[in-house]
Image: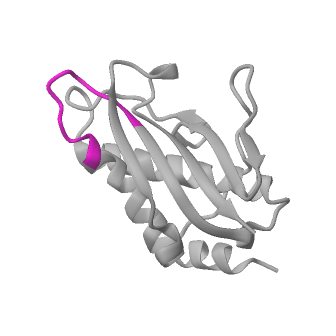
Amino acid sequence: MSSAIETRLAELGVTLPDAPAPAANYVPYVISGDLVFVSGQVPMKDGAFITGKLGDDMATEAGAETAKACAVSLLAQLKMACGGDIDRLVRVVKLTGFVNSTPDFGDQPKVINGASDFLVEALGDAGRHSRSAVSAASLPFGVAVEIEGIFEIR
């Protein structure tokens, strides 16, 4: 039986993938009290990294779609942290988004809106969060976006 959150995701055409394994010497999440700190998630599609540089070879709208892909991976990690019961989520507390962008690109917030808008659409008020959107000269594997998150659970 699907959880309420997974039912809502399905209505949006989203199925949570298996949580990606860490790419280096770190853990995918840490639980401290009622908070889950999820390590930075990078965008994947069909098993491949979504690469690009905003302001060069990727448009803002495409960047926002990659940020949404990161948010889906964040939820997949959260589900694993919750022992498979993502309905333990109380709220999204904070996202920090990194955008692989040229020095003159200034629409990092519009890119990270792809993740923020998706989380609010999927989770309602529980998806509203504080946030940072930061430019990065480069990101691992050449990905366009990386997002980390803090979540409150019960």
Residue 143 image point, x, y percent: 45, 28
From this viewpoint, is residue 12 visible? no
Corner quadrant of residue 6: bottom right
Q: Quadrant of the C terminus?
A: bottom right
Q: Quadrant of the N terminus?
A: bottom right
Residue at x 42% of width, y 45% of height: 66
Residue lying at the far left in this picture: please name it.
Answer: 104
Would residue 108 be found to the left or right of residue 43 on screen?
left
Q: Quadrant of residue 57?
A: top left
x%, y% of residue 82?
79, 60
The residue furthest right is 83
* Front in this rendered view, residue 85 or 130: 130
Instruction: Please state which of residues 127 and 71 is positioned toward the viewer in this rendering.
Output: 127
Who's the residue at 68% across and 81% down the image?
4
Magenta residues span 98-109
Residue drawn at point x = 40 percent, y = 50 percent: 131
